[in-house]
Amino acid sequence: MKAGKNTEFRLLRRRLWLQIAGSVLAGVMVTVALVSLLQGRMARCITDLIALVSRCRLTQAAELYERVFRSHRDLFLWLLILGVVLCLIHLHLRRVEGYLREVNQALGQLTENTGHQIHLSSELQPLERRLNLLERQMQTQQEGIREQEQKKNDLVMYLAHDLKTPLACSIGYLNLLLDEPDIPSGLREKYLRIALTKSLRLEEMVQEFLEISRYSLTTVVLHRQTVCLNRMLAQLIHELHPVLANRNLDCSLESAKDIRICCDPDKLQRVFDNLLRNAVQYSREGTCIQVQMKTADGQVRISVTSQGEPVDRDRLDHVFDPFYRVNPGGSPQGTGLGLAIARQIAEKHGGRIDADSTDGKTCFTVTLPLKEDRAAG
């Protein structure tokens, strides 16, 4: 890598050396020429000028020249060399200033995000390539930020629009109960249940709004302790029994032995709860969700496999993007943050989440280290 950096600006280094060598050669030639002139034709010119100015004879002017110039020849020679050197330094500083001016203009173009290709002198080609690469990366990041912001705005719009329906429904039934005190008890109970259901839906939507705020304003902080993954998953599956029963689904857990890891149990439960609920939502009725745990190479792999409509690769590549929903055209199902936050939690634990969909089966696999990863926490 060091050798590559040394050869990166070879053309610039060679060009500067050639300029220095040429300038030194030119300086030597100029100095020699000026010394020759001072001792030859230039000396006669100076003598004539002295005679003209002082209105003396030529011999007197020659004696004055000898006394003033010839006796201090070394001083004048060093002053001449110093003047040539200062001129050479000035020329080189102008060249370096030109390079810096180019780089400054390129940086200005980069910060202004003009989108135009950056062009520098041939000696600065390595820097030109890096600046153009940086510009492309910045454009890609900005496009990603704009896309996420648009998804977030769309989601907030969907949620705000959907808030009206359950809220209006709850208000309508409560007003009806308030205005009609003689409603039969059976019908009253029915209205109350409807109002309660709509109110619970409102609570879910408010939680979704809070989820968006938490994702935007906070980062995941882990509070680790040793837990048994088997018990955690068994408890989550047990809590899902009512939802599974409503969809005529089953869920099985396969694990050879008890597996213990050091993790943040609350946040890891959130990961698996999200994966299981996604599996329930997109599973075909009458099928079985399979949860398997295997250990290998100091890691534990937990896979959640559901049977339903296959997810094509284009959509599968974006399921972990914030605010992305597999079916954005329909009514919003969650914030689209569940899998994004799940991946963040897994990565904080030193692991990862992968997704695959083949032959009508969609599988999410969580890979976690069996040993505690202090750096990740």
Image (cartoon, rainbow, N blue to C red):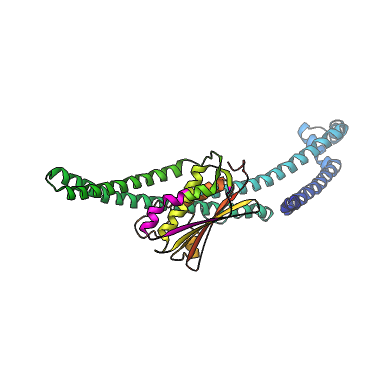
Q: Position of residue 12 (x, y in %)?
A: 72, 52
Q: Nearer the viewer, residue 320 or 365?
A: 365
Q: Position of residue 13 (x, y in %)?
A: 74, 50
Farthest front residue in view: 257
Q: Does the magenta-highlighted stretch encompass residue 240?
A: yes
Residue, x 18% and y 47% (percent of image)? Answer: 188
Q: Quadrant of residue 375?
A: top right
On screen, residue 358 versus residue 244, left or right, reads: right
Residue, x 28% and y 49% (percent of image)? Answer: 197
Q: Is residue 105 above or below residue 48?
A: below
Q: Does the magenta-highlighted stretch encompass residue 92?
A: no
Q: Nearer the viewer, residue 10 or 76?
A: 10
Q: Position of residue 315 (x, y in %)?
A: 47, 62
Q: Is residue 275 above or below residue 94?
A: below
On screen, residue 187 versus residue 127, left or right, reads: left
Residue, x 74% and y 41% (percent of image)? Answer: 89
On screen, residue 311 versus residue 207, left or right, reads: right
Which span is picked out in magenta? 235-259
Q: Position of residue 55 (x, y in %)?
A: 78, 32
Residue, x 26% and y 51% (percent of image)? Answer: 165
Q: Nearer the viewer, residue 146 or 226?
A: 226
Q: Quadrant of the C terminus?
A: top right
Q: Nearer the viewer, residue 189 or 95?
A: 189
